[in-house]
Amino acid sequence: TQTVELEQDQATLQIKQFGTKSNKLIVSEGDSIEIDMKKWMRWQPLIVGTAVFISSMLTPQIESSAFFENWNIYVLAGLVGLTVGTIVGLPYLFFDSYELYKVEC
């Protein structure tokens, strides 16, 4: 439980942590707020696992491709890591990760 003192009658509350954020909620003195994960966040471990699995399956094909034959293996690994990181990280930029809502005391 966290108590916040308001300097005004109403305030807009939004939480942010490590690049994730919640919806904005207008609160007044005495309101009780709960935080819950958005439904898409429950799927995030599966999305990460799938992205890592697919990248591990594609890496040998990328290495054997004629286009990449003269590339350093570390450059290829970096490109694959950057691509997977971008795919996994994009939802955090466009969607709220948490939901704030008022509850009755």
Image: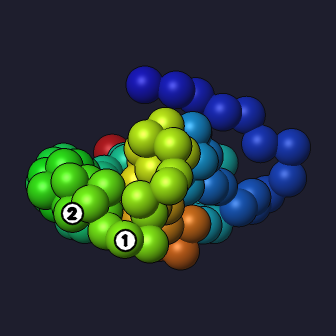
49 or 11: nearer the eye? 49
Alpha-carbon span between mark 2 and mark 1: 10 Å
**Quarter of the image holding residue 64?**
bottom left
Q: Against 91, is 14 above or below?
A: above
| Three-letter code for the amino acid on which mark 1 is drawn | Ala
The answer to whether 17 appears left or right of 10 in the picture is left
Count of all numbered marks drawn on residues in the image: 2
Disc 1 is placed on an element classified as helix
Residue at screen point 37% across, 48% down: 34
**Quarter of the image holding residue 40?**
bottom left
Residue at screen point 51% across, 43% down: 72
Q: Residues within 10 Å of mark 1 (few under 14, many from 20)?
A: few
Say which label, 2 or 1, has the lower sequence index.
2
**Res. 66 mark:** 1
**Quadrant in which the N terminus appears:** top left
Disc 2 is placed on an element classified as helix
Q: Which residue is mark 2?
A: 61
Residue at screen point 65% across, 55% down: 13
| Three-letter code for the amino acid on which mark 2 is drawn | Gln
55 or 65: nearer the eye? 65
